[in-house]
Amino acid sequence: MTATLTIASVPLPSAPVGEVNPLPAVATMPQAPYEASTEGLPAEIASNIAYGRVDSIHPYLLQDQYGRERSMSPMRLAVLENEHMRAEFALDLGGRLVRLLDKADGRDLVYRNDVFQPANLALRNAWFSGGVEWNIGMRGHWPLTCDPLYAAEVTGPDGEPVLRMWEYERVRGLIVQLDATLDAHAPALHVQVRVRNPHPVETGMYWWTNIAVAQTAESRVFTSATQAYRTDYDGRLSLVDLVSDDVSYPASAPVAADWFHVLPAGELPWIAALEADGSGLGHVSTARLKGRKLFVWGDNAGGRHWQDWLGGDYFEIQGGLATTQYEHLRMPGGATWEWQESFLPVHAGDPSGAWAAASDRVASAVRAAASRASDGPARLEAVADLAPRRVLQAGSPWGALEAALSARYGVAFEGLPGVRFDADAGADAAYWRSLLGSAEAADDPSVPPSSYVAGELWDRLLAEVPASWLTHYHRAVMAHARGELRAAVAGYEASLRLRRSAWALRGLGLVRLASGETDAGLADLVDARMLAPEIAPLALELGEALLAAGRAEDARDLLSALPAPMRELGRFRVLAVRAALASADLAEAGGLLEEGIEVPDIREGELSMSELWRQAFPDRPVPQRYDFSMS
């Protein structure tokens, strides 16, 4: 049976991601709940950890406007299928591989979530569990994990279809191309990843393929490693011996933890997750993808709560470019890096027993499965440079706009031959198309700008075009995100002299607060909210600032003046508890907590709910619904 590539729509109980937060993400990006200490680590790992840290997700806007009410909604899928397997990719959700069915035994090899529920685990906030996620650019779940990708069909020289997905990642300035195909001779999904730095300057590079696997009590994970770097979300990376300290059963982990396996050099990188009957998923790759990791949520109240919160029980096996997930690599200007990954059903016999012997048996089974799947890798190499035959979906315009901007100033921008970007895609970029001379765009200051840019060339363009409230504002935002507060103040004030807008007032207020000008900063935020009272994030920022300034009663007055639908949102109810506690009103705070507060975007590692409960009820245990502890 020749494979097919079709578009399908599967209904799923879903909480929509919703509109983006319209306020630019100028604040320092929330970091992961744990940081790595480099003490005692090899020099290469320590150097990579110190390099390439990203403090701002700008120019992306946050995706934090979702809830937890679900209704049946279609998930749009690209489906590769042949007699051996069915692979389903969510085109509107970062190209996530949400299902991989082994037809021989009817088993889903990756964890297939039966709901779509965003939660706050990604760099832009919204993330969902399940399937196989592609993470590029910087540590964390990548900015496009809940955004559409370009998608197209390419035909191999043997007539077999290849699904191509691609996009431009805006923080690092990288082009990523993902080609996927099913093997014709054996059950296997092959993926070729090609990453291009189109700019002439070095940038930081990061990649981890995150593979969710349904967790049972018997699930066991294997690699060829005998050692791993373990972290328990406390900042330490400790080297553990996998032979003497068997950590291969995810369900047995007492708390959330990562194990970064140290694979032997010169061997085929692989990792496998098997069940008690010896069957499961194997993941192998070419040598560049040398890292392998096991992540578990842990068998404690917080770990179980997080899995329930996301939709079900799972663990993750992962593959990355570095040994640990704390590292960024130096990618030279103009460089292209590529590798292949294969996802295979594995049948290894009895997977129990001592780690070393069991791992050897699994290694043999993984190598045998990979050797049988022989035609897909060659097909991917043959089509890597071919132009798409049938476009299935458009993505964002940013790759095309960055290329046009670079051309305007005579700066090299070398793309990939197998992808093309559409400058007219996306209504949110109309203003930037107008600056580049290809469109007209309105600049109504009562409407929040729909997108933002970053980088020296965009700043240069804004300085050269006729000055307006919007050009000054965008230059101020870029300076603000870079931490250049004096330049940001000058830009915001110049914008306000031309036209008064909530957006420039908000930016100016945040800078003044950061500079210790509390009264002036609060006044700016009050004025911003008066100009745009319907924008909930503006009201929330003002409430947070009032509390930080010790003005709890003013925060309570703000909350009481809000319209009821806004006041009942989870973050505003948390603000009400905090304001009551700051006013020594334990009865009010306790009453709100006992009524029940649901914060849809509570962040991974955030313990705000349990801490508030302990303040209100120091002698009562934290209820399970408020326990998100990962340690």
Image: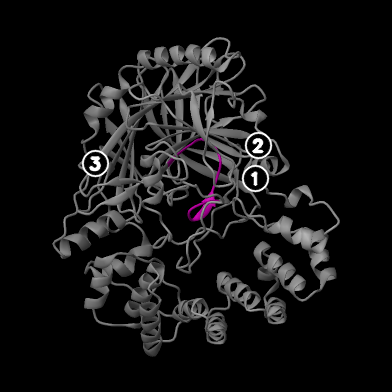
Label of residue 336 in the image: 3
Amino acid carrying mark 2 in the image? Gly
Q: Which residue is mark 1?
A: 630
Q: Residues within 10 Å of mark 2 (few under 14, many from 20)?
A: many
Identified at 69% across, 40% down, the residue is 304
In-image side of 398 versus 58 (left or right): left
Identified at 48% across, 23% down, the residue is 226
Horizontal and vertical percent for residue 604? 59, 50
76 is higher (above) or lower (below) than 382: below
Q: Which residue is mark 2?
A: 298
223 is higher (above) or lower (below) than 152: above
Q: Residues within 10 Å of mark 3 (few under 14, many from 20)?
A: some
- Quarter holding residue 251: top right
Q: Which residue is most to the front?
A: 40
Q: Which residue is most to the bottom?
A: 497
Q: Is residue 442 visible?
A: no
Image quadrant holding the N terminus, namely top left
Q: How many marks?
A: 3
Marks 2 and 1, Cα distance to the nearest angstrom? Answer: 8 Å
Magenta residues, start to end: 121-134
Local secondary structure at mark 3: strand
Q: Nearer the viewer, residue 603 or 539?
A: 603
Of marks 3 and 1, which one's residue comes earlier in the chain?
3
Disc 2, disc 3: CB below 8 Å? no
Identified at 36% across, 52% down, the residue is 52
Identified at 77% across, 59% down, the residue is 613
Disc 2, disc 1: CB below 8 Å? yes
Amino acid carrying mark 1 in the image? Met
